[in-house]
Image (cartoon, helix red, strand yellow):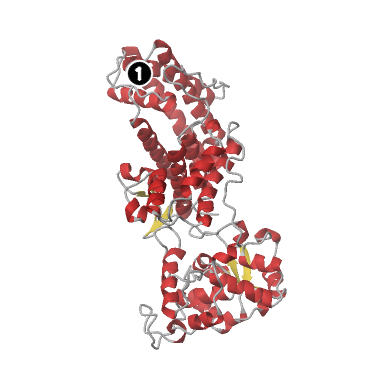
């Protein structure tokens, strides 16, 4: 996908915008990190937002680390051996960071230009010289500044897991040891910058007394790395928020421990808690103010609140299980198949969650005032003289009815996504623009435009949009706060269904996809083609199907009935 989930444009200027993760919102001081990237050029903004995202994630991680250690009792004094270990750990960390920078080519692996990479490298080399001069001057005079003390305290927390009392007599010794480590490290890094080979020493062993510390990464640290990687490569803001929230609940339920310390018992304990809580449990009045999953589950069970559905339980287990699948490929110590087989067995088909619309419901939907004449766009449910053939509320249900496309896929269509090949007009469902999102790779596909849509004037709408030089096919349908176009329209469509008497527990916009499947089967369309048209087959874009291939195979014969 081109674009970045945190890139946001306002009045032609691009911004970085990220919601503060739910697990730290209460103490972070604000709900989002939004600031101007000071450019109107998309390509430049894309480079800048990647850098900004890393910096903002570091702020989030630093805040989490601070919260995690707040409850720990402070250490009053360090032994001489611990102070020496601190210096060795600090030296290792500086070289390890330098390794990290070089492995990524100073931005080359992120796709930065040679000019940008060269500038980053020169700035980095200048920083080496500046740090060396500063710390040599302080070390020569035995100078310890308050900022040096703060850095040493933070390093002790971050690198050794020691919360040292700021009044400890060991603090000054730790600062001086850190100065020595920085000087040694900057010398080594400066030699590397000139092409000399300097090996990074292994991470020094830390004294186990009184700070027993596993060499295996903590779950919370691994989750941080996982979420940061996924947010940069595939997740949108909503997906990141869901995964972070439920991983935090998992950690709170079974504890934050080294990865190799978890077993299937932990997965079962988490599932047991999930099976007792209601959907949107924080919104239930008796559970408001409870932040811990196990406490909410216990209270919900005690007062008899209806639990969430088995499918929702499995969805959350999938969120957490996806972390452990990722971790298996990253860390040798990760237990294998931790969440395999943990999901609840559901006998009914996925389709059973939603019904197709009945013929009477379809007639009610497409004979509503929106299609026969309404008073205005605002009063779409009242009869009148306006048939809003330029509006998204008119076309989006029709397109899904005759294509099986998902709501979000339709709303985010660009004018340029309506194409023609060999006399066949078709929709290109893709995620090539920054604000377009698809469910999976199979969702990239070509869908011939049904003759009924053409008869109703769909291609005329496209021509009007082209004449207006519009980018989006339905510019009247705005994006929701969660970054999805489908969120506001989903609320509208549920109101619409209620207004025409077509709303049941198992009907929603998704019901159009089931109607489309039924029409495919009734007209002899193969399952392979039906799956490809709907974006959940195995071929997807990689299968090489063209609009002509799809059209000639029979999909154009689909009828409204």
Tell me, yes or no, if residue 363 can be seen here: yes
Q: Is residue 111 visible?
A: no
**Residue at screen point 43% across, 23% down:** 160
Q: Determine the residue located farthest toward the top in the rendered image.
A: 80
Name the foreground residue: 172 vs 68.
Answer: 68
Q: Residues within 10 Å of mark 1 (few under 14, many from 20)?
A: many
Relative side of 507 to 424, left or right: left
Q: Quadrant of residue 561?
A: bottom right
Residue at label 1?
Answer: 175
Left or right of residue 288, residue 443 in this image: right
Q: Position of residue 52 (x, y in %)?
A: 42, 44
As helix, strand or loop, the secondary structure at mark 1 comes to helix
Relative depth, front residue between 100 and 220: 220
At which x and y percent is residue 238? 45, 53
Q: Is residue 520 left or right of residue 308?
A: right
Residue toward you, 312 or 23: 312
Q: Is residue 212 above or below residue 473?
A: above
Could you say which quadrant of the image residue 379 lies in? bottom left
Q: Who is closer to the viewer here, 277 or 184?
A: 277
| Residue in the picture at 51% in, 75% down | 397
On screen, residue 384 above or below 377: below
Residue at image position (42%, 41%) is 57
Give the x, y percent position of residue 351: 59, 65
């Amino acid at each position: 996908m081109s674009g970045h989930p945190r890139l946001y444009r306002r009045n032609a200027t691009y911004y970085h915008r990220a919601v503060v993760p739910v697990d730290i919102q209460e103490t972070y001081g604000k709900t989002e990190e939004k600031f101007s990237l000071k450019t109107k050029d998309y390509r430049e903004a894309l480079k800048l937002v990647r850098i900004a995202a890393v910096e903002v994630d570091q702020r989030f991680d630093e805040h989490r680390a601070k919260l995690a250690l707040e409850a720990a009792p402070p250490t009053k004094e360090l032994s001489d051996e611990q102070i020496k270990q601190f210096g060795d750990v600090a030296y290792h960390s500086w070289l390890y960071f330098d390794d990290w920078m070089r492995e990524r080519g100073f931005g080359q692996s992120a796709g930065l230009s040679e000019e940008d990479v060269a500038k980053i490298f020169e700035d980095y080399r200048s920083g080496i010289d500046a740090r060396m001069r500063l710390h040599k001057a302080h070390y020569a005079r035995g100078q310890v500044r308050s900022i040096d003390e703060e850095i040493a305290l933070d390093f002790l927390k971050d690198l050794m897991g020691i919360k040292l009392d700021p009044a400890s007599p060991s603090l000054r010794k730790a600062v001086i040891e850190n100065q020595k480590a920085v000087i040694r490290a900057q010398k080594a890094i400066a030699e590397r910058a000139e092409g000399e080979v300097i090996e990074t020493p292994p991470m020094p062993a830390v004294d186990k007394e009184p700070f027993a510390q596993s060499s295996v990464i903590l779950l919370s640290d691994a989750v941080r790395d996982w979420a940061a990687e996924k947010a940069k490569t595939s997740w949108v803001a909503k997906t990141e928020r869901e995964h972070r929230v439920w991983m935090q609940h998992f950690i709170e339920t079974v504890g934050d421990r080294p990865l190799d310390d978890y077993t299937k018992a932990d997965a079962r304990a988490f599932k047991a808690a999930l099976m007792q809580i209601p959907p949107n449990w924080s919104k239930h009045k008796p559970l408001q103010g409870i932040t811990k999953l196990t406490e909410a589950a216990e209270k919900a069970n005690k007062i008899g609140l209806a639990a969430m559905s088995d499918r929702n339980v499995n969805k959350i287990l999938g969120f957490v299980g996806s972390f452990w699948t990722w971790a298996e490929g990253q860390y040798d110590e990760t237990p294998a198949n931790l969440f395999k087989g943990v999901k609840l067995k559901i006998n009914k088909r996925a389709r059973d969650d939603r019904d197709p619309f009945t013929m009477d419901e379809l007639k009610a939907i497409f004979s509503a005032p929106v299609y026969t004449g309404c008073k205005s766009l605002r009063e779409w449910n009242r009869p009148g003289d306006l048939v809003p053939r330029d509006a998204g509320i008119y076309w989006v249900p029709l397109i899904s009815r005759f294509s099986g496309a998902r709501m979000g896929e339709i709303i985010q269509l660009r004018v340029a996504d309506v194409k023609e090949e060999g006399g066949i007009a078709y929709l290109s469902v893709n995620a090539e623009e920054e604000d377009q999102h698809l469910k999976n790779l199979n969702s990239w596909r070509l869908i011939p435009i049904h003759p009924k849509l053409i008869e109703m004037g769909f291609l005329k709408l496209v021509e009007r949009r082209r004449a207006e030089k519009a980018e989006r096919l339905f510019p009247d349908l705005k994006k929701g706060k969660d970054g999805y176009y489908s969120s506001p329209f989903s609320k509208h469509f549920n109101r619409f269904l209620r207004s025409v008497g077509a709303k049941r527990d198992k009907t929603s916009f998704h019901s159009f996809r089931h109607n489309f499947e039924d029409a495919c089967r009734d007209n002899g369309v193969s399952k392979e083609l039906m799956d490809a048209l709907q974006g959940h087959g195995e071929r997807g874009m990689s299968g090489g199907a063209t609009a002509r291939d799809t059209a000639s195979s029979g999909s154009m014969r689909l009828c409204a009935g």
